Amino acid sequence: MVKKFVQDVKSEARSVFTLAWPLVLAEIGWMAMGLVDTIMVGHMPNSAEAIGGVSLGGVIFYTAAMFGGSILFSLDTKVSQSFGAGDLADANHSLLNALYIVAPLAPASMTIVWLVGRSLPAMGVNPGVLAQALPFLRAMNWSTLPLLLYFTFRRYLQAVDLVRPVTFALISANLVNLVGDWILIYGHLGSPAFGVAGSGWSTCISRSYMAALLFGVVVWQHRRHKLPFLDRPLRPDFARVAELLRIGFPVAVQMLFEIGVFATATALIARLDAASVAAHQIALNCASLTYMVPLGISSAAAVRVGQAIGRCDPVAAGRAGWAALAMGAGFMSLAALVLVLAPRLIVRAFTPDVLVMQVGVKLLFVAAAFQLFDGLQTVATGAMRGAGETRIPMISSFVAYWVIGLPVGYYLGFEQGLGAVGVWAGLAVSLAVIGTSLVFAWRRKVRMLIAGSADRAASLVV
């Protein structure tokens, strides 16, 4: 029995991998876009203030945008289950009603970003950084609608197994952004030199390009299946809208919990010496890079699980989730090994500073300790989302990060004098808690799905 289960999981792993690798590349492409912006403004005369402005504006914008975009993760659940059931018309119905969510969500997000930007002068932000952050933030804010449309079309397309256009969109958008930065920041090809604001406008253009490209793919996909792009009637189905919000809102809140805890950790470490702050940023960049792989696998897990549930095959859903978990755990174990074996080489790639090296090496050892658990919690969250369960990951995130991890990190970092290493140790504890709890939650969810299917089959026989 165990041997057959392992063989089935291995077989499913091939399907998960086929779906996951383009999504992993897409996540890396998403991360690269912000990196390109930082590098391009870093060559301006006032590079420190320019980088600071892009960093501050980016944090504000992405916090609001990712909250809104995460609500649309509910399409992973609804569209993949409809696709698994062979009901593309219902998948199309979910897409239409997701657009009705985007319609008020975009101006609401833009208003929040605008209000936060208006309040920055009263927060004591460095005047030089503030002078760069505000025009960048104003330009970036206009990318909200195309970004949310991109999220909508992307979630739909990956749920119907069209993932390569998503990868192409992000990779090519990086090229659009790079050229746009070169033209708009520095005033090439007859364009005025907008400075840091040019980076924001370039990002806005690249996101409009991504949304338009994926929109074209969605239209092509509907024509191929002889379906109208938007089902009739065009009025909103408030029951479907409510269902999408019920699934997606906990995902958005969970995202806020995660963003908030790392932002708070950064603020705490900022109270320490400059070397600790720099080492924290280096380690956080490394951890964020490795995180992109299980994040892509997580999306694949949500789709494969949702499709299996749509086919009324809970056993296959379980296999898909376990295969994705094994894949995520395998990669993150290798990532941990690299962090353990080459921490000095990694830190030296960022800086030769001896003090930063000393702290950075220790932080990378801590990062190595939580890699496995970070992979497990990310992939398990995706698998649970495919099954329509988003509240348990949300609650687990709150308890693990804010009730356990952050207090432990503060105690070790400041009461016990371990500094940045202590704060990171608290984060490691929280990830160990959430990773372990979500694996057991997924196991329980699979058993419930199989038991529910058996009960339905028995009632039909009777």
Image (tube, grey):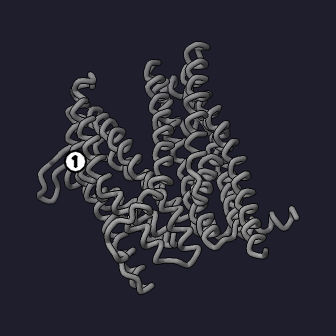
Residue 387 or residue 155, whichever sits in front? 387
Direction from residue 189 to residue 82 in the image, left or right: right
Query: Is residue 29 visible to the viewer in this orientation of the structure?
Result: no
Q: Residue 133's quadrant in the figure? A: top left
Q: Residue at x 55, y 35 (%)?
A: 398
The N terminus - image quarter: bottom right
Could you tell me how many numbered marks the image carries?
1
Residue 136 or residue 264, whichever sits in front? 264
From the image, tell me which residue sits under label 1: 139
Query: Is residue 21 visible to the viewer in this orientation of the structure?
Result: yes
Q: Position of residue 152 (x, y in %)?
A: 40, 62
Q: Residue at x 61, y 53 (%)?
A: 379
Residue 381 or residue 184, whichever sits in front? 381
Direction from residue 131 to residue 16 in the image, left or right: right
Q: Residue at x 25, y 54 (%)?
A: 202
User: Considering the numbered disc 1 on the image, is that residue within a helix, a strand or a loop?
Assistant: helix
Above or below residue 155? Residue 252 is above
Q: Position of residue 407 (x, y in %)?
A: 57, 23
Q: Residue 426's quadrant in the figure? A: top right
Kind of residue at badge 1: Ala
Q: Residue 92's quadrant in the figure? A: bottom left
Above or below residue 138? Residue 17 is below
